[in-house]
Image (tube, rainbow, N blue to C red):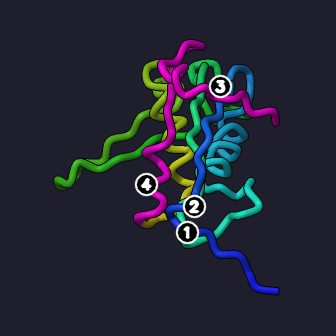
Amino acid sequence: MSTYMAKKGDVVRKWYILDAAGKPLGRTATIAATLLRGKHKPTYTPHVDCGDFVIIINTEKAVLTGNKLTQKYYRRHTGYIGGLKETQYKKLMAERPELAMNLAVKGMLAKNSIGRKQLTRLKLFRGPEHKHAAQQPVVWAE
């Protein structure tokens, strides 16, 4: 019995929709990361990008549990001395909820070229409408 190794040309990609309304941000991000990596498929191969496309709708309705809204910060650095910028998640979720979801999913993917390629297949939308109806996405049942 030999181990199956997927090849780049054999990968069939599907489109899935995740609804983040009323669900914890991290729980939705873990499901999205699993789908993007392709770990839900029996043909999963770690060194081959065999994941699917993921559409996350209602990102502004995702919730953060506990005191994360006030205690958690998004930090970035400008590259200059003393250039650390901090944004509280309360402000981030109010102004740019897509970025908060993107950061959560990005942290769960591989930190290499495969992970960067997988992140390009993540589509985020603030409301219930999305522009990928032509791809006939399927709602993912958790």
Q: Which mark is residue 37?
A: none
Q: Earlier in the sequence, mark 4 or mark 2?
A: 2
Q: Which mark is residue 62?
A: 3
Distance from disc 1 to disc 3, alpha carbons, whole Å, reads 36 Å
Q: Earlier in the sequence, mark 1 or mark 4?
A: 1
Q: Secondary structure at mark 2?
A: helix
Q: Amino acid at mark 1?
A: Lys
Q: Nearer the viewer, mark 1 or mark 3?
A: 1
In the picture, residue 141 is in which quadrant? Answer: top right
Q: Quadrant of the N terminus?
A: bottom right
Q: Nearer the viewer, mark 1 or mark 4?
A: 1
Residue 18, above or below 75: above
Inspect the magenta stretch and tell me whether residue 141 lies in it.
yes
Distance from disc 1 to disc 4, alpha carbons, whole Å, reads 16 Å
Q: Is residue 22 left or right of residue 57?
A: right
| Residue nearest the viewer, comparing 131 with 83 | 131
Residue carrying label 1: 7
- The image position of residue 107, as x and y in percent, is 54, 53
Q: Quadrant of the C terminus?
A: top right
Distance from disc 1 to disc 2, alpha carbons, whole Å, reads 5 Å
Q: Residues within 10 Å of mark 2 (few under 14, many from 20)?
A: few
Distance from disc 4 to disc 2, alpha carbons, whole Å, reads 17 Å
Q: Secondary structure at mark 1?
A: loop
Where are the magenta residues, as a range? 113-142
What residue appears at the point 64 percent right and 75 percent down from the top-left corner?
A: 5
Distance from disc 2 to disc 3, alpha carbons, whole Å, reads 35 Å
Residue carrying label 2: 10
Q: Earlier in the sequence, mark 2 or mark 3?
A: 2
Q: Which mark is residue 117?
A: 4
Q: Amino acid at mark 3?
A: Ala
